[in-house]
């Protein structure tokens, strides 16, 4: 008689990699960014906490958690030490949140309150702007707008009723934009990370901070290497030495900015600046990428000088932060790079489509952030909401479609510049101006132009965009995607907390101290937005449409580079490097890229890959030394120099 089979032993339940503890700590870091993004930019006037894709507001708390908090846990509760996946979850949440609290939310708050406060007889906003402004989009109560910019009387509450409607519709759009980006990343993650194997050089630093090998006294492995402390000390010494001048203004400082390199009066200058963070980041970029940035920046400088010398009209070239000539060439390059990258991903996208609608076994989406069906439905639904928002603000469906298509090209292009090219930030052509030039302002009615002014709340200063930070975070999350419910919760909480927290803090602080005192975004920038629209309504033919033809140079150059790399795979120049060379702040940091490229080239030629890996400790030390120095400078400013701080900004 056969014995009954024993019940199979239950599989041990694995501990979750994305824990609620990590999500809670991540939320605390996000709340810090929601406060600090506005404070450092507009109140403290110290180094901006969130202005690039590797911001100190996310990195400095992460260093403290990885080194100090984990070391204390090793002593007090060894079993409670934060794991690698928990640490990456915390940093990923901070990174995603860092795209929003400073410039993004600042432009939004200023745009909501400005139209009725700055209107006067001279600018004639009341004649050209107010009749076309949807009532749901701005603060129409002139007293509430005045108090926002000048400060409210004491013992008077913040007039939230005047802000309720515009904040609801503006913040709901931000949430949908975030969801659109998350759906897009869920679809493209496998293509970028597993198929194309993009390098994500900016994420080398946070990943290195979670490595515990080789073991030593410090919980971060690389910090137990002598080369790390050599790089750390070299950068830290310069920062702390210069910090003495905060207290003694005549104290001699160690400069990192040197005289401009100029070829002649017709040529834009090349900036000679040494930035430790850029040198460190450049070390982890591909050699062909840094070489391409250097070569094309030099060629672009010579090209602008030659055109100026010949008297060919290309617009001003000696301008800050970058010239229209550069912007259009970069835009032309992105108009080739983005469609080409989608064409290269056609097999993956076809498999995603079949998986979403036929449940094909060709591809597995169980380990993705969202199922492909959910991602596709969410992508289409959020795109329709964004377009409907634009139409409701006054733009026609056709103009909206063109604007949104150009917007996707720019967003995806900037994302490729970061995850493949290693750019810490990118300011390129704005989709609004590209639409004006391509369609012609004379074909866009006044209400449509006013609608464009409203879009500048969520697509204006594009040094940082949410899509790029979502893409970088997806790289950090790549080894524990299976816990997608908790990851989705973490991402959703990060965006919600930073948006709501930043909006609340910016509104309340502005009513207390007067936003006009902040200047910048709350002054000339927002006035220029509506002044430009007024000018275009009054004289739609003042904009020179032929400038858009400059984009053909960038597109043609990119096509040639792609063709050469296809025919000769070893061709040393990269199309992403060409696009990156046209973007701000490359024209300010190219000298640092040169030293990173030269150092890496020598190390690889002399010592090979083994020497490169050892040298990585030195460059990581430089980067962390810079971030720790910024953190110390911030604390010094908060204690001794409140509201008159000192910036260690890269550009």
Image (cartoon, grey):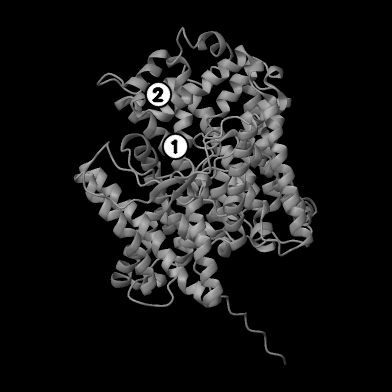
User: Would you identify the image quadrant in which residue 404 lies?
Assistant: top right
Q: Is residue 485 visible?
A: no
- Is 591 on the left-hand or right-hand side of 635? right
- Is 127 on the left-hand or right-hand side of 633? right
Closer-to-camera residue (600/356): 600
* Residue ranking furthest to the bottom: 1
- Number of numbered tags placed on the structure image: 2
Closer-to-camera residue (435/62): 435
Residue that appears at 73% across and 38% down: 552
- At mark 2, the secondary structure is helix
- At mark 1, the secondary structure is helix
Q: Is residue 158 visible?
A: yes
Look at the image and tell me in which quarter the C terminus lies: top left
Closer-to-camera residue (494/322): 322
Residue that appears at 53% across and 49% down: 469
Residue that appears at 39% across and 61% down: 622
Residue 581 at x, y = what percent?
59, 47
Residue with the mark numbered 1: 500
Point out the tag, 2 or 1, that comes first from the N-terminus: 2
User: Would you identify the image quadrant in which residue 229 lies?
Assistant: bottom left
Q: Is residue 13 above or below residue 413?
A: below
Residue 541 at x, y = what percent?
67, 16
Residue 527 at x, y = what percent?
47, 21
Residue 608 at x, y = what percent?
55, 76
Residue with the mark numbered 2: 160
């Amino acid at each position: 008689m056969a014995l009954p089979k024993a019940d199979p032993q239950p599989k041990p339940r694995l501990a979750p990699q994305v824990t609620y503890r990590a999500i809670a700590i991540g939320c605390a870091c996000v709340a810090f960014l929601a406060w600090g993004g506005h404070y450092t930019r507009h109140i403290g006037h110290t180094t901006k906490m969130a202005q690039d894709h590797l911001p100190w507001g996310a990195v400095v708390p992460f260093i403290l958690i990885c080194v100090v908090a984990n070391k204390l846990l090793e002593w007090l509760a060894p079993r409670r030490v934060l794991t690698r996946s928990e640490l990456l979850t915390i940093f990923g949440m901070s990174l995603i949140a860092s795209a929003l609290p400073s410039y993004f939310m600042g432009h939004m708050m200023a745009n909501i309150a400005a139209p009725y406060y700055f209107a006067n007889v001279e600018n004639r906003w009341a004649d050209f702007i107010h009749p076309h402004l949807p009532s749901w989009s701005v603060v129409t109560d002139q007293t509430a707008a005045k108090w926002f910019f000048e400060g409210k009387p004491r013992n008077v509450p913040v007039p939230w009723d005047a802000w309720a409607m515009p904040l609801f519709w503006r913040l709901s759009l931000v949430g949908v934009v975030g969801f659109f980006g998350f759906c897009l990343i869920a679809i493209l993650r496998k293509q970028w990370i597993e198929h194309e194997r993009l390098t994500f050089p900016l994420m080398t630093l946070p990943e290195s901070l979670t490595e515990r090998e080789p073991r030593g006294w410090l919980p971060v492995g690389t910090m137990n290497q002598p080369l790390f402390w050599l790089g750390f000390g070299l950068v830290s010494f310069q920062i702390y030495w210069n910090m003495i001048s905060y207290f003694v203004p005549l104290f001699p400082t160690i400069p990192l900015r040197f005289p401009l390199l100029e070829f002649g009066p017709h040529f834009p200058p090349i900036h000679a600046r040494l930035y430790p963070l850029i040198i460190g980041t450049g070390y982890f970029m591909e050699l062909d990428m840094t070489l391409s940035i250097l070569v094309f920046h030099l060629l672009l400088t010579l090209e602008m000088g030659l055109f100026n010398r010949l008297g060919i009209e290309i617009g001003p070239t000696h301008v800050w932060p970058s010239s229209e000539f550069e912007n259009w060439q970069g835009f032309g390059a992105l108009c080739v790079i983005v469609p080409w990258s989608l064409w290269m991903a056609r097999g993956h996208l076809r498999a995603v489509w079949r998986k979403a609608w036929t449940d094909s076994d060709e591809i597995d989406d169980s380990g993705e952030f969202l199922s492909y069906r959910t991602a596709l439905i969410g992508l289409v639904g959020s795109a329709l909401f964004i377009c409907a928002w634009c139409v409701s603000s006054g733009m026609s469906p056709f103009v909206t479609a063109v604007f949104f298509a150009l917007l996707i090209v720019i967003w995806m292009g900037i994302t490729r510049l970061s995850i493949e090219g290693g750019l810490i930030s990118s300011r390129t052509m704005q989709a609004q101006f590209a639409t004006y030039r391509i369609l012609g302002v004379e074909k866009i009615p006044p209400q449509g132009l006013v609608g464009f002014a409203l879009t500048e709340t969520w697509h204006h200063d594009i040094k940082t965009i949410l899509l790029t930070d979502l893409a970088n975070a997806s790289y950090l999350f790549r080894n524990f995607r299976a816990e997608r419910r908790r990851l989705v919760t973490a991402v959703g909480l990060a965006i919600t907390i930073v948006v709501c927290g930043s909006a609340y803090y910016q509104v309340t602080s502005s009513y207390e101290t007067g936003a006009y005192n902040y200047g910048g975004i709350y002054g000339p920038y927002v006035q220029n937005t509506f002044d430009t629209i007024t000018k275009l309504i009054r004289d739609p033919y003042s904009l020179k449409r032929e400038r858009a033809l400059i984009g053909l140079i960038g597109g043609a150059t990119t096509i040639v580079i792609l063709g050469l790399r296809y025919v000769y795979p070893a061709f040393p120049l990269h199309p992403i490097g060409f696009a990156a060379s046209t973007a701000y702040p490359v024209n300010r940091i190219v000298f640092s890229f040169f030293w990173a490229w030269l150092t890496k080239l020598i190390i690889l030629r002399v010592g090979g890959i083994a020497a490169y890996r050892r040298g990585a400790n030195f460059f990581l030390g430089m980067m962390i030394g810079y971030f720790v120095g910024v953190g110390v400078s911030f604390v010094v400013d908060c204690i001794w120099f409140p509201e008159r701080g000192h910036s260690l900004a890269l550009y």
